[in-house]
Image: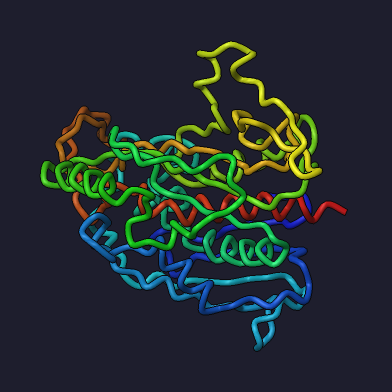
Amino acid sequence: MFGKNVTVDIFGESHGEQIGVVAKNLPNGVKIDLEELRAFCRLRAPGQNEFSTPRKEEDNFEIISGMDENGVLDGATFKAIIKNTNTRSQDYEKTVPRPAHADYPCFVKYGRISTGGGRYSGRLTAPMCILGGIAKQILSSRGIEIDAHVASIHGVEDDSFDWLSNSVSGIHKKPFPVINDEKGEKMKQEILSAKENGNSVGGEIECKIVGLPVGVGDALYDGLDGAIASSVFAIPAVKGIEFGLGFESTKVLGSENNDEFIFDNGKVQTLTNNCGGILGGMSNGMPLIFKVAFKPTPSIFVPQKSVDLKTKENVELSIKGRHDPCIVQRAVAPVISAAAIAVLDLMEEK
């Protein structure tokens, strides 16, 4: 369960009959563009190109409650589901945990390895994108826009967002969401090279939020950065997050890191944005910038050492099935969704 004001629960398993999302206290009376929402959800859908898993799921969602026939949120508990239609459970081992997956702690805690990753699968980001797409539209109606792009893959880096500009250009909607298409082609080659060798690669996603009023969030456990981080870590494969200059700020002096204030046409702004738009857990009116690190997809075809938890023997595991050689390009929509859900939750504070 996530959220204090807009509460969110994502349910189901990767190879179960259905997955879905339940949310309470969404703003009443907001009209949602369902075609735009479907297009947003398709950004993370599998099986669309050679850079993702061959598993084909249309991710067509069905809204059960919380929205009327005209697409207007009606104040009731929101619930939406997606039916899983293309599973192959026979591809998965029942007692041999896959390295870098949740299989082993899941087996110890619940007595079984969940087929296809179960609740720990990236498949659960599909219902996250339903609610995230709705939250994104609600925020957009309030003048708050969110964009994201693939910042790097296996060391190949894209250009960065302009941290001072209060505008976004919808880069996340591109088939391969990068700012610099030439660098994007190099990223694609990194993915295909790993795929040809039965391996995988990871990377980073940079997200930008503009239009936030000053003061969203609060101190300690109610911080805006903490809420976004908590929401983003619901995405499997996330291994780190940084805001603004992040870890690079450890390498500079305070005089270089501090964002100096100025008046610009009567409005307070900063000359730089090393803080990433957050001070003391609160938005400061500048663009909110954060970057998320994704590990390489753990399901690879290279033989690996593992153990058989039933026979208590060391074994060699050769993973079968359909898996992404890189999930970063498909994770752009989930990162936007996680951020939108967290921001909307804080903005609904009464």
Using the image, determine if residue 232 lies above or below residue 128.
above
Nearer to us in this view, 311 or 278: 278
Residue at 36 percent across and 47 percent down: it is: 328
**Quarter of the figure with residue 33:** bottom right
Horizontal side of 326 relative to 26 (left or right) equals left
Q: How far from the left and from the top, in percent, is residue 297?
A: 31, 42
Color encoding of the figure: rainbow
Using the image, determine if residue 147 lies above or below residue 246.
below
**Quarter of the figure with residue 131:** bottom right
Horizontal side of 264 relative to 276 (left or right) equals right
Q: Please, which residue is most extreme toward the right here?
A: 350
Q: How far from the left and from the top, in percent, is residue 298?
A: 30, 40
Residue at 54 percent across and 26 percent down: it is: 246
Horizontal side of 122 relative to 50 (left or right) equals right
Q: How far from the left and from the top, in percent, is residue 90?
A: 24, 59
Horizontal side of 343 relative to 241 (left or right) equals right
Q: Please, which residue is most extreme toward the bottom here?
A: 69
**Residue 60 showing in the rendered view:** yes
Nearer to us in this view, 95 or 258: 258
Residue at 47 percent across and 52 percent down: it is: 119
**Quarter of the figure with residue 285:** top right
Q: Please, which residue is most extreme toward the left here?
A: 196
Q: Please, which residue is most extreme toward the top here?
A: 253
Q: Check the picture and name the quadrant holding the C terminus.
A: bottom right
Q: How far from the left and from the top, in percent, is residue 344?
A: 71, 55
**Residue 103 showing in the rendered view:** no
Count of numbered marks: 0
